[in-house]
Image (tube, rainbow, N blue to C red):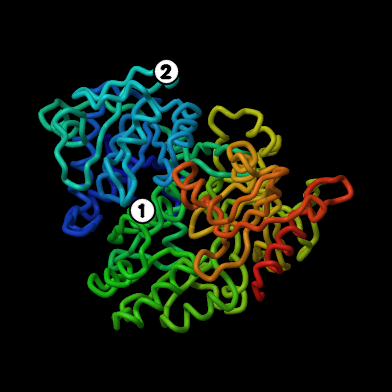
Amino acid sequence: MGKVKQIGTEFYHEMTIPEMLDAAASKWPEREAIVCREQRITFGQLKELAHTAAKGFHSIGISPGDHVGFIMGNYPEFVWLQYALILLGAKVVPININLKADEIKFILQNADISALVIMDRFREIDYFSILQKITSEFTCDKSGNVNDLSLPKLRKIIIFNPTGVKYSGSFTLENLMELGRPSKEVALPKLNPADYAYVMFTSGTTAFPKGAMQSHQTILGGGYYYGKGIDLNINDKYLCFSPFYHVGGLISGLYSCQVHGATLHLTEFFQAEEATLIIAKERITAAWGLGVMFLRIMESAKKLGADLSSFKKAVIPTGGNIFERIVKELQLDVATNSYAMTEGGIISITLPDDSNWEKRRNSHGKPVPDIEVRVVGHETRKPLSPNEIGEICFRGWNRFLGYYNMPKETTDAIDEKGFFYTEDMGRMDEEGYLYWCGRYKEVIKTGGENVSQLEVETFLEDKTPWIKRAGVVGVPDKRWGEAVTAIVQLKSGCSITAEEVISYLKGKIADFKIPKHIIFIEENEWPLRPTKKLDKMKLREMAIRKLGIVL
């Protein structure tokens, strides 16, 4: 790849992800890059594994521009496999591991996936049975070949078996790596920092997810500023319990550590007791996490008598009293809030040299350098005065390139001047601090996942035999942040319990999308606007009242 570029404050404008990998391996060859259970991989070894995997992918026909999907938990294998694909000029498409067969198939079709790397099992999920529902041609043959008319782009399925089970009749990750070991070096394409490297799927307000194309500079710049926000450095050990198919795991987790030379410790999914024990055992110093995640870790530490004294740095995208409680009880040296999304990677953050505690506690920080953020009228798109609440929009190196295969949705969201309109409500004060105030778009943030209200409503109305009308909202919940709640009107003559509805939904949609509460109402109880559209604000107030939630 020629001369190795040096990682510096402006590197993300001119460096590609493979160049960053080269720079990290050159600068910290013996330093641990990834730790997961018994696996401990240095930056130098990570580069070697990536190049071996790249030769393996090349040998099965992966070419520049191909889209490769991943359904994997937070395993070290994901890290070097995604590097391998980017080396080849292919695009990485991380897929939510909790999705069901129809949801996965939509993404495979929409994103033109040509190869899929998928686990055999994860917790209680059997992915072999899911594959058989997705494609009638999935037979686990040794070559991994797929030939399904409903998925014309999909050519290969590669099985990753973290359980250690051997599969003699399928093409596995071990087979891929074996193909790469004896192979000659592959000629790698020249990449541009402005090229997209990832397609990251987001729920949004439509019934189906949208794939946001993220460039090298968006990913690397986001990693740089997330790390800078908590003064991340080569002495840090960072625990990543946010999944790689989310910004919190991929950019704030993986890439902030890769850019700043910190060690990334992985846990396959968030489980408070496990995270607590890892922090205590490995002397973890830093992490990104929702407020509810840190509160559960603090509760577990008290129950287990675990020592969390090493933990001193955190990105906590939760403000106010919860932020303050976490900072004080964990005695953090540096903590920051931030504003980010799939379409933007990182937008604003409070940096360590900002001494204004009230702003740090209550705001989402200031826009990162070379990002322009505005608050505009939701209908007019005209700039508003300081502290007026409107729609947050932004443009700059962090902005995604567009929604893959969705030109209309892209044009609707990005104007001719390059501003992306987020559908988030917010305000900006006189000093330039940004405050997120809610959502115009109807998305519920529950346990670290984004749930489209419309998607769940559509499923309830179209796929269940009893429900005539459904309205879905998020209500406050100590464990989940927001709990998915469905207010439903039954069809005439139908009778069913909430428990029966929830049982029916299991296995048909992802578990995190299944409502935690079902509330039954009559037709005359729907709160409507003058336009006869459903008033979601009043519907949420109704749900909170009927559930007896005290705010």
Q: Which residue is mark 1?
A: 254
Are dots 1 and 2 in contact, CB under 8 Å? no
Compared to 158, does 59 lie above or below?
above
Q: What is the residue that sits farthest to the front in this orientation?
A: 493
* Labels in figure, total: 2
Q: What is the residue that sits farthest to the right in this orientation?
A: 530
Identified by mark 1, the residue type is Leu
Compared to 527, does 408 lie above or below?
above
Which residue is at a point 46% across and 66% down the rendered structure image? Answer: 315
Identified by mark 2, the residue type is Pro
Which residue is at a point 85% across and 51% down the rendered structure image? Answer: 529
Relative image position of residue 174 (x, y in whole percent)? 16, 36
3D distance between C-alphas at marks 1 and 2: 32 Å
Compared to 367, does 399 lie above or below?
above
Relative image position of residue 245 (x, y in whole percent)? 42, 46
Other-residue count near label 1 (Cα within 10 Å), few / some / many at <14 / 14–19 / ≥20: many
Relative image position of residue 532 (x, y in whole percent)? 85, 45
Of the 4 image quadrants, the one containing the C terminus is bottom right
